[in-house]
Image: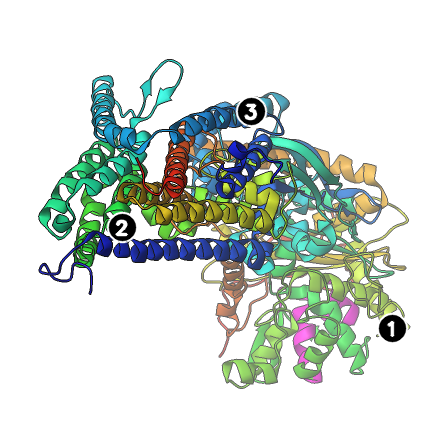
Amino acid sequence: MKLGSRKTSIVTASTLDNAFKRRSFLVAAGMGGIATLLATRMGYIAIAENERYELESESNRVNLSLIPPRRGWILDRNGAPLASNRADFRVDVIPDQLADVSGTLTALGRILRLDEASMADVTKRVEEAAGFQPVEVASGLDYEDFAAVSVRLPDLPGVVPQRGFSRHYPTGPAVGHLIGYVGPANAEEYEEEGNPLLITPGFKIGKDALERQFEQDLRGVPGARRVEVTASGRIVQELETREDVQGDPVRLTIDGPLQDYAARRIGLESGSCVVMDCENGDILCMSSMPSFDPNSFSQGIGRVEYAMLRDDDRVPLRNKVLKGLYPPGSTVKPMHCMAFLKAGIDPNRTITCGGGVRIGNRFFNCWGNHGQVDMAKGIYQSCDSYFYRMALEVGFDKVADFAKSIGMGKQFDLPVISQFYGTVPSPAWLEKKYDRQWQAYDTANASIGQGYYLANPLQLAVMTARLATGRHLYPRLTRSNKSTGADQIDFPEDHVAYVRQAMSDVVNGPGTAGRGRLPFDDILMAGKTGTAQVVSLSKSDGKSGPWKYRDHGLFVFFAPFDKPKYAGAVVIEHGGGSGAAYPIARDVMTFMFDPQKGMDALRALEEQWGGTAQERLTRKYIAYATAAGEAVPPAPSRDEEIFDLVEAEARVAARQSEAIADTVITPRDEANPSSDAPPPDSVVAPGTAAAPQAAAPDAPSPAPATAGTPRPQ
Amino acid sequence: MSVIPAPVARQPWAMLFPLFILIGFGGLVLYSAAGGSLDPYAGSHLLRFGVFLVMAIILALFPPDLAKLAAYPIYVVLLILLVIVEAIGFVGGGSQRWLNLGFMQLQPSELMKPALVLVLARFYSDLPVGMIGTWRAVVPAGILIGLPIMLVLAQPDLGTSLAIAFGGGVVMFLAGLPMRWFVMGGAAAAVIAPLAFFFGLQPYQQRRVFTFLDPENDPLGDGYHITQSKIAIGSGGFSGKGFNEGTQSHLHYLPEPHTDFIFATMAEEWGFVGGVVVIGCFALILYWALSVARNSNDRFGKLLAAGMAATIFFYVSINLMMVMGLAPVVGIPLPFMSHGGSSMMTNMVCIGTLMMVYRWNRLQGRKGTLG
């Protein structure tokens, strides 16, 4: 009988007793079941999942903090630091651990006296950071500020004040483009590498140029500190500490003082200077100005600074040595002569320049009227007619092949993030690129380095070094690489000697760069001027008017001319002609042979300009920040976006001259041939180049170019 | 025959041995939880046990008549105390669960658990056998259970009210009420529980339930207790980290290492072995308690002993399920191990009552009938 199943069923004491027995057994069974369940659960947690929980217990107990490694130094060829480390105090925040984001940041801003713009930058970075990523609030603090933050730590969870090292670039803007800068790793970089070091407060990775290229060498091995901590974060005991291992130094071929000198000498202009060692291809300097101060980028690029750099039409963010492409203009003429020599042209053969030459039924203008012109005169007087004629005779595809073999249109095996390679126009290239037949005027344009011709300053320097030595030198940027090419002879001795002499005459003889003479009796510099047109004559005469439309000034050089030790190139964007470029080359070479003399010349100039490049940049920043106030829009949060923008703009800029590549160039005055010319950096007025040259008795005085002469089509 | 004197030999050693092991073990764990010191936990734990053991032994001497006589008065007094506690809390502007008696803090809701079992046992033993299937078996008992539960819920103390309900429910079940009422009751509870959950529980209690269902969702907030407790138990492994070597408790990762989470503290240092010993001891004690109930010839004794066993069981099972992540965090300590006077008192009252029934059984066995 089932208990209580029917009301009618008779309930007695014994049925209740039985019910109690059954039901208490049920209860006991339930209890036993629970006990078994608990024991099983315990076994599961403690034995089956033991490993996992043991790990979690350890990670509770032990706090492993990485000590960011000191970054390896970047040294110049003599072992002087171009990038070193400075001990400093810094403050980071870890967004995930902030209890009250805006409150904490406001408190920090007050303690550290941060201005509005940097507060806005910090706030934006905190908002965009991935939470676990530390965000730098300030670095380079003095001890008082550091201590002020440290004592308030209990009220500021997530704030990490630290004593550490920060990157220091002693010459600041002079090495900005060459070396790049460091900054905190972004979320993608951390995801890619998965290394917890990347999200350690105070750790920076190379963001650009050499700092990025040699990241793994420079990084070093982080130190570590293992401490036992309580739940509230109090340190119970230090378990062990491992010192960091500093990153390896990277030794460059760069000559630090020269790099700095060249950068400063470029002055107010926008341009670049490359100098190579003719014995081994070492790049001694590759300065590009104006530039940015890599010291100020290490927290991330601030909005004011970024806005200032963006607004500058001299594009301080572009490395003009590698990403500036310019029509090489007349600087390719000595190289073309070498090509003619190779093709069997007799250097003594003369042509007649009558302010140009007639080829077929068309007349091609020369910048002057040079009369009888042989190869040497073609170089030192930069006679365009000679090159029109000879290039047509030899055929430009041969010249183009030669140009490529000497390094034009080539990328070099260098530890750089990217380099533009420019263009050496040739019939095949034109056909492929623009689907059009090569015309005689293409040859004419290309023969004087115009038209589609594009080169970067590094290529010009390599070209010059190879011309000057006759050897196939390869540029080299780090001392650890082997220098190559010095034993590979490209050109016969007599050809080299001939070109050297003609290029020396450009400076020291009856040439176009009389003011380029070095102030030494025994050391002569050889060179070649170049003026590259970027817009048509109808837009600008190339020397005045809007800066953007002025001609580029170029100069390639080597010294001493008879036994070349150094070769290089200077390109001044929109300098109004080569007159803007070769005085810089002269002073740079002067500095190489006599630093004192070089510095004296520079100091006089810097007095006019208002201080060194770094001083001017600092002043400009303060002025800009004051003027712009709070209305500055934030900088892109990813540096890569900035790089992409800069690169895209550089590509656009490089195509500026393309617009006139399809028309016949009317060559510009080739600098000022006389040695008693106006002071450096004054824009050469049209017509002054027509001054008679005593040094060139064998040639008629070059006449002013007839600007705007309509050409028969 | 034996060298052991009779008064010692007749004590319920089947229960006392595991009990002493638990108490001693609890003392060791508390010693470690205090960072290797008798103060402030282990010493008072052992002292309290001594005091309450004497109380239990005295309790065990009560005859059945006295126990029956005292059932209703005790219940009413405690009910009044609960009301007073509530009133003090109301006047004081906050929730209060205890009365300060000067020498100790009395928590009436704790004592209500054994008292309710006592009063229900009395009620059902008095109830004429024929009425067991009628409303008269349920309604008075329901009121007896419902009043204290309402008062305790108002404190609010969900854990204790559940314990009271569980003890009362088990007594009703064993009293032989028709099975279908429990089925219907269970069905009704299944309907009411969700409603009660959303409208009856405080937000913090609701959160605890959610956290229990998904502790990893909020490892630094509400899930912290469960997560840390599981880490402590799991990191102990088979044989533990060793006495006084527990890092979870010593470095304060484990919350309440000496009260609610003492099992985790123990398991971290003693491992699975320690856990099995503890669970085994409780199993032995409860087995003994249920056999006391079954051996009683008297309906009052049966229900009283079984209800006490259920009360202890509820403490143990909920606490262990909680620390192992099988139940939400409710503030229920582990009997005989956790540091705390109230729970020690309640559980020793249960033990004393069981010893009392054990003594009745023994006397009955000798005399044939009980006075």
Q: Is residue A217 above or below residue A59?
A: below
Local secondary structure at mark 1: loop
Look at the image and tell me in which quarter the N terminus of chain A lies. Answer: bottom left
Q: CA distance from mark 3 to mark 1?
A: 92 Å
In the image, taking residue A499 as reference, residue A447 lies left or right, namely left
Q: What number is the disc on residue A488?
A: 1
Front-lying residue, A317 or A107: A107
Which numbered disc flags the more N-terminal residue, 2 or 3?
Answer: 3
Q: Amino acid at mark 1?
A: Gln
Q: Position of residue B73 (x, y in %)?
A: 22, 26
Total marks placed: 3
Q: CA distance from mark 2 to mark 3?
A: 39 Å
Q: Amino acid at mark 2?
A: Leu
Q: What number is the disc on residue B43?
A: 3
Q: Nearer the viewer, mark 2 or mark 3?
A: 2
Q: Nearer the viewer, mark 3 or mark 1?
A: 3
Q: Position of residue B126 (x, y in %)?
A: 18, 40
In the image, taking residue A204 as reference, residue A220 lies left or right, namely right
Q: CA distance from mark 2 to mark 1?
A: 107 Å
Name the subunit of mark 1. Answer: A
Q: Which region shows up in magenta?
A: A366-394
Q: Position of residue A225 (x, y in %)?
A: 69, 40
Q: Position of residue A148 (x, y in %)?
A: 56, 21
Q: Is residue A683 above or below residue B244?
A: below
Label 2, on which residue?
Answer: B174
Q: Residue at x 18, y 43 (%)?
A: B199
